[in-house]
Amino acid sequence: MIISRTRGIILCAALLLSAAPAVAQAQALNANEMRGTNLSGQWQSGRGVVTRGNDGKVIFLFGEVQPSVVCSPLQVCDIELQAGEIVRDVLLGDTVRWKVEPATSGAPGGQAIHLIVKPSEAGLVTSMVITTSRRTYHIQLKSHQSQYMARVGFEYPEDVNARFAEISARMEASIVPGAGIAADQLNFAFRMSGSARWRPTRIYSDGQKTYIQFPSSLSGQDAPVLFVVSGGENRIVNYRMNGSMMVVDYYIDHAILVSGVGRQRQKITIRRGG
Protein backbone atom coordinates (compact mmCIF):
# COMPACT_ATOMS: atom_id res chain seq x y z
CA MET A 1 0.00 0.00 0.00
CA ILE A 2 2.85 2.34 0.91
CA ILE A 3 4.68 1.42 -2.31
CA SER A 4 1.58 2.18 -4.41
CA ARG A 5 1.10 5.58 -2.72
CA THR A 6 4.76 6.42 -3.26
CA ARG A 7 4.52 5.55 -6.92
CA GLY A 8 1.52 7.89 -7.25
CA ILE A 9 3.44 10.78 -5.70
CA ILE A 10 6.38 10.16 -7.99
CA LEU A 11 4.07 10.06 -11.04
CA CYS A 12 2.43 13.40 -10.12
CA ALA A 13 5.82 14.99 -9.59
CA ALA A 14 6.98 13.72 -12.97
CA LEU A 15 3.89 15.15 -14.67
CA LEU A 16 4.44 18.55 -13.03
CA LEU A 17 8.08 18.60 -14.05
CA SER A 18 7.22 17.67 -17.63
CA ALA A 19 4.60 20.46 -17.81
CA ALA A 20 6.96 23.11 -16.42
CA PRO A 21 8.87 23.69 -19.71
CA ALA A 22 5.58 24.10 -21.60
CA VAL A 23 4.34 26.70 -19.08
CA ALA A 24 7.64 28.56 -19.22
CA GLN A 25 7.53 28.54 -23.01
CA ALA A 26 3.97 29.92 -23.01
CA GLN A 27 5.08 32.76 -20.69
CA ALA A 28 8.07 33.70 -22.85
CA LEU A 29 7.53 36.69 -25.19
CA ASN A 30 9.24 37.33 -28.51
CA ALA A 31 10.62 40.73 -29.55
CA ASN A 32 7.38 41.98 -31.14
CA GLU A 33 5.31 40.84 -28.17
CA MET A 34 7.70 42.61 -25.78
CA ARG A 35 7.51 45.80 -27.85
CA GLY A 36 3.72 45.58 -28.02
CA THR A 37 3.32 45.13 -24.27
CA ASN A 38 5.76 47.98 -23.60
CA LEU A 39 3.84 50.33 -25.91
CA SER A 40 0.54 49.30 -24.33
CA GLY A 41 2.07 49.79 -20.88
CA GLN A 42 3.15 53.33 -21.77
CA TRP A 43 -0.43 54.16 -22.77
CA GLN A 44 -1.89 52.43 -19.69
CA SER A 45 0.47 54.12 -17.23
CA GLY A 46 0.64 57.54 -18.93
CA ARG A 47 -0.31 60.47 -16.74
CA GLY A 48 -2.16 62.50 -19.37
CA VAL A 49 -4.27 65.58 -18.67
CA VAL A 50 -6.68 65.48 -15.72
CA THR A 51 -8.70 68.58 -14.86
CA ARG A 52 -11.74 69.56 -12.80
CA GLY A 53 -15.01 70.21 -14.57
CA ASN A 54 -18.40 71.44 -13.42
CA ASP A 55 -19.81 70.13 -10.12
CA GLY A 56 -16.49 68.52 -9.13
CA LYS A 57 -16.32 66.25 -12.16
CA VAL A 58 -12.88 64.79 -12.92
CA ILE A 59 -12.21 65.33 -16.65
CA PHE A 60 -9.95 63.11 -18.76
CA LEU A 61 -8.93 63.94 -22.33
CA PHE A 62 -10.36 61.04 -24.31
CA GLY A 63 -7.83 58.86 -26.14
CA GLU A 64 -4.70 60.46 -24.65
CA VAL A 65 -4.01 57.69 -22.12
CA GLN A 66 -5.96 54.95 -20.41
CA PRO A 67 -7.93 56.72 -17.66
CA SER A 68 -7.55 55.23 -14.18
CA VAL A 69 -10.76 55.65 -12.19
CA VAL A 70 -10.51 55.17 -8.42
CA CYS A 71 -13.59 53.85 -6.60
CA SER A 72 -14.29 52.78 -3.03
CA PRO A 73 -16.52 50.16 -1.35
CA LEU A 74 -19.90 51.48 -0.17
CA GLN A 75 -19.51 54.46 -2.53
CA VAL A 76 -20.42 54.96 -6.18
CA CYS A 77 -18.31 56.24 -9.07
CA ASP A 78 -20.34 58.03 -11.73
CA ILE A 79 -18.73 57.81 -15.20
CA GLU A 80 -20.61 60.15 -17.53
CA LEU A 81 -20.38 59.71 -21.29
CA GLN A 82 -21.05 62.25 -24.03
CA ALA A 83 -24.64 63.43 -24.41
CA GLY A 84 -26.43 61.55 -27.17
CA GLU A 85 -23.95 58.67 -27.11
CA ILE A 86 -25.55 55.22 -27.17
CA VAL A 87 -23.87 52.44 -25.18
CA ARG A 88 -23.53 49.12 -27.01
CA ASP A 89 -21.61 46.93 -24.54
CA VAL A 90 -19.88 47.18 -21.15
CA LEU A 91 -17.20 44.54 -20.53
CA LEU A 92 -15.43 44.03 -17.19
CA GLY A 93 -12.28 42.07 -16.43
CA ASP A 94 -13.68 41.14 -13.00
CA THR A 95 -17.43 40.71 -13.06
CA VAL A 96 -17.58 39.14 -9.58
CA ARG A 97 -16.16 41.90 -7.42
CA TRP A 98 -17.12 44.87 -9.60
CA LYS A 99 -20.66 45.93 -10.48
CA VAL A 100 -21.75 48.42 -13.14
CA GLU A 101 -25.28 49.83 -13.41
CA PRO A 102 -26.62 52.24 -16.07
CA ALA A 103 -28.33 55.58 -15.46
CA THR A 104 -29.34 58.53 -17.64
CA SER A 105 -29.62 62.31 -17.37
CA GLY A 106 -30.82 65.14 -19.60
CA ALA A 107 -33.79 65.71 -21.85
CA PRO A 108 -34.96 63.08 -24.34
CA GLY A 109 -33.00 63.26 -27.58
CA GLY A 110 -29.86 64.52 -25.84
CA GLN A 111 -29.59 62.23 -22.84
CA ALA A 112 -26.23 61.31 -21.36
CA ILE A 113 -25.48 57.77 -20.22
CA HIS A 114 -23.96 57.33 -16.75
CA LEU A 115 -22.20 54.14 -15.65
CA ILE A 116 -22.40 53.71 -11.87
CA VAL A 117 -19.40 51.64 -10.79
CA LYS A 118 -19.20 49.89 -7.39
CA PRO A 119 -16.37 47.64 -6.08
CA SER A 120 -17.04 45.05 -3.38
CA GLU A 121 -13.73 45.54 -1.56
CA ALA A 122 -10.57 47.64 -1.52
CA GLY A 123 -7.30 46.78 -3.25
CA LEU A 124 -8.83 45.61 -6.54
CA VAL A 125 -7.56 46.42 -10.03
CA THR A 126 -9.35 45.51 -13.25
CA SER A 127 -10.17 46.95 -16.67
CA MET A 128 -13.39 47.98 -18.35
CA VAL A 129 -14.22 48.41 -22.04
CA ILE A 130 -17.26 50.46 -23.11
CA THR A 131 -18.34 50.40 -26.74
CA THR A 132 -20.73 53.12 -27.90
CA SER A 133 -22.25 54.51 -31.07
CA ARG A 134 -19.33 56.97 -31.35
CA ARG A 135 -16.20 55.46 -29.81
CA THR A 136 -14.68 52.81 -27.54
CA TYR A 137 -13.55 53.59 -23.98
CA HIS A 138 -10.75 51.62 -22.30
CA ILE A 139 -10.73 52.37 -18.57
CA GLN A 140 -8.71 50.99 -15.66
CA LEU A 141 -10.61 50.56 -12.40
CA LYS A 142 -8.97 50.65 -8.96
CA SER A 143 -10.60 50.34 -5.55
CA HIS A 144 -9.32 52.19 -2.48
CA GLN A 145 -10.41 51.88 1.13
CA SER A 146 -11.57 55.51 1.41
CA GLN A 147 -10.50 57.58 -1.62
CA TYR A 148 -12.67 57.66 -4.75
CA MET A 149 -13.71 59.80 -7.73
CA ALA A 150 -17.35 60.72 -7.30
CA ARG A 151 -17.85 62.00 -10.85
CA VAL A 152 -15.82 61.29 -13.98
CA GLY A 153 -16.25 62.70 -17.49
CA PHE A 154 -14.35 63.26 -20.70
CA GLU A 155 -13.24 66.10 -22.95
CA TYR A 156 -13.26 65.09 -26.60
CA PRO A 157 -10.63 66.39 -29.08
CA GLU A 158 -13.22 66.72 -31.85
CA ASP A 159 -15.34 68.95 -29.60
CA VAL A 160 -12.34 71.17 -28.88
CA ASN A 161 -11.57 71.41 -32.61
CA ALA A 162 -15.22 72.21 -33.35
CA ARG A 163 -15.17 75.07 -30.83
CA PHE A 164 -12.01 76.50 -32.36
CA ALA A 165 -13.56 76.19 -35.84
CA GLU A 166 -16.67 78.03 -34.62
CA ILE A 167 -14.58 80.83 -33.15
CA SER A 168 -12.55 81.08 -36.36
CA ALA A 169 -15.73 81.20 -38.43
CA ARG A 170 -17.13 84.04 -36.31
CA MET A 171 -13.87 85.95 -36.64
CA GLU A 172 -13.77 85.42 -40.40
CA ALA A 173 -17.40 86.52 -40.69
CA SER A 174 -16.50 89.83 -39.04
CA ILE A 175 -13.64 90.41 -41.50
CA VAL A 176 -14.59 92.54 -44.49
CA PRO A 177 -13.27 91.23 -47.83
CA GLY A 178 -10.41 93.18 -49.34
CA ALA A 179 -9.33 95.06 -46.23
CA GLY A 180 -8.78 91.86 -44.21
CA ILE A 181 -9.68 93.57 -40.93
CA ALA A 182 -12.79 93.77 -38.76
CA ALA A 183 -15.68 95.94 -39.93
CA ASP A 184 -15.55 98.13 -36.80
CA GLN A 185 -12.09 99.34 -37.88
CA LEU A 186 -13.25 100.57 -41.30
CA ASN A 187 -14.83 103.79 -42.50
CA PHE A 188 -18.00 103.21 -44.55
CA ALA A 189 -18.95 106.92 -44.70
CA PHE A 190 -19.03 107.29 -48.49
CA ARG A 191 -21.89 108.66 -50.59
CA MET A 192 -22.60 107.76 -54.20
CA SER A 193 -24.63 109.55 -56.85
CA GLY A 194 -25.47 108.55 -60.41
CA SER A 195 -26.62 105.31 -61.95
CA ALA A 196 -24.85 102.50 -63.73
CA ARG A 197 -25.35 98.79 -64.17
CA TRP A 198 -22.06 98.29 -62.30
CA ARG A 199 -22.91 100.68 -59.45
CA PRO A 200 -20.74 99.68 -56.42
CA THR A 201 -22.45 97.74 -53.68
CA ARG A 202 -20.31 99.32 -50.96
CA ILE A 203 -17.27 101.50 -50.46
CA TYR A 204 -15.03 101.63 -47.40
CA SER A 205 -11.54 102.60 -46.32
CA ASP A 206 -9.00 101.49 -43.75
CA GLY A 207 -7.45 104.95 -43.59
CA GLN A 208 -4.78 104.24 -46.19
CA LYS A 209 -6.57 102.50 -49.03
CA THR A 210 -10.08 102.65 -50.41
CA TYR A 211 -12.02 99.52 -51.37
CA ILE A 212 -14.79 99.69 -53.96
CA GLN A 213 -16.93 96.55 -54.14
CA PHE A 214 -18.76 95.99 -57.44
CA PRO A 215 -21.51 93.48 -58.18
CA SER A 216 -20.21 89.93 -58.59
CA SER A 217 -21.39 89.93 -62.22
CA LEU A 218 -18.78 92.57 -63.13
CA SER A 219 -15.77 91.22 -65.01
CA GLY A 220 -12.36 92.83 -65.02
CA GLN A 221 -12.74 93.96 -68.63
CA ASP A 222 -16.02 95.75 -67.86
CA ALA A 223 -14.66 97.61 -64.83
CA PRO A 224 -15.00 101.40 -64.99
CA VAL A 225 -12.07 103.81 -64.88
CA LEU A 226 -11.47 105.68 -61.63
CA PHE A 227 -10.58 109.37 -61.53
CA VAL A 228 -9.84 111.22 -58.29
CA VAL A 229 -11.01 114.82 -58.24
CA SER A 230 -8.26 117.07 -56.87
CA GLY A 231 -7.86 120.83 -57.43
CA GLY A 232 -10.75 120.84 -59.86
CA GLU A 233 -9.09 118.25 -62.10
CA ASN A 234 -9.67 114.55 -62.68
CA ARG A 235 -6.53 112.61 -61.92
CA ILE A 236 -5.78 108.91 -62.28
CA VAL A 237 -4.39 107.20 -59.17
CA ASN A 238 -2.98 103.70 -58.66
CA TYR A 239 -5.59 101.02 -58.27
CA ARG A 240 -6.00 97.37 -59.15
CA MET A 241 -8.85 94.95 -59.61
CA ASN A 242 -9.08 91.92 -57.31
CA GLY A 243 -12.02 90.00 -58.74
CA SER A 244 -14.97 92.39 -58.36
CA MET A 245 -13.09 94.51 -55.82
CA MET A 246 -11.26 97.70 -56.83
CA VAL A 247 -8.41 98.43 -54.42
CA VAL A 248 -7.31 102.08 -54.55
CA ASP A 249 -3.92 102.96 -53.08
CA TYR A 250 -5.36 106.23 -51.83
CA TYR A 251 -7.77 107.49 -49.19
CA ILE A 252 -10.15 109.27 -51.53
CA ASP A 253 -12.34 112.25 -50.70
CA HIS A 254 -13.92 112.82 -54.09
CA ALA A 255 -13.74 110.48 -57.09
CA ILE A 256 -15.56 109.55 -60.29
CA LEU A 257 -16.09 106.15 -61.85
CA VAL A 258 -16.65 106.31 -65.61
CA SER A 259 -17.32 103.73 -68.31
CA GLY A 260 -18.36 104.01 -71.96
CA VAL A 261 -18.49 107.07 -74.23
CA GLY A 262 -21.20 109.25 -75.71
CA ARG A 263 -24.69 108.04 -74.98
CA GLN A 264 -23.27 104.84 -73.52
CA ARG A 265 -21.32 106.78 -70.93
CA GLN A 266 -22.12 105.87 -67.32
CA LYS A 267 -20.80 107.77 -64.31
CA ILE A 268 -20.86 107.32 -60.54
CA THR A 269 -19.64 110.09 -58.26
CA ILE A 270 -18.14 109.17 -54.89
CA ARG A 271 -17.72 111.54 -51.96
CA ARG A 272 -16.42 110.83 -48.50
CA GLY A 273 -18.48 112.05 -45.58
CA GLY A 274 -21.96 111.64 -44.12
Image (cartoon, rainbow, N blue to C red):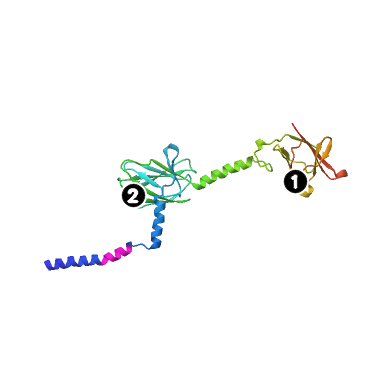
At a point 42% along the width and 38% down the height, the residue shown is: 56
Residue occupied by mark 1: 240
| Crowding near the residue tagged with mark 2, few <14, some 14–19, many ≥20 C-alpha atoms within 10 Å | some
User: Which is nearer the eye, 102 or 261?
Assistant: 261
The stretch of residues the image draws in magenta is 18-26
At a point 39% along the width and 54% down the height, the residue shown is: 41
Q: Is residue 270 visible?
A: no
**Quadrant where the N terminus is found in the figure:** bottom left
| Crowding near the residue tagged with mark 1, few <14, some 14–19, many ≥20 C-alpha atoms within 10 Å | few
Q: Give amino acid for label 2.
A: Val
Q: Is residue 222 visible?
A: yes
Q: Is 215 one of the magenta-colored residues?
A: no
Q: Earlier in the sequence, mark 1 or mark 2?
A: 2
User: Which is nearer the eye, 132 or 157?
Assistant: 157
By secondary structure, the bulk of the magenta-drawn segment is best described as helix
Q: Give amino acid for label 1.
A: Arg
Q: x, y percentage for residue 84?
A: 48, 45
Q: Secondary structure at mark 2?
A: strand
Q: CA distance from mark 1 to mark 2?
A: 71 Å
Q: x, y percentage for residue 133?
A: 47, 51
Residue depth check, mark 1 versus mark 2: number of the one nearer the observer: 1
Q: Is residue 182 left or right of residue 63?
A: right
Task: Return the mark for residue 35.
Answer: none
Dividing the picture into quadrants, the one containing residue 274 is: top right
User: In the rendered image of this protein, does residue 99 appear above or below residue 202?
Assistant: below
User: Which is nearer the eye, 206 or 64?
Assistant: 206
Residue occupied by mark 2: 125
Residue that sits furthest to the top in the current view: 274
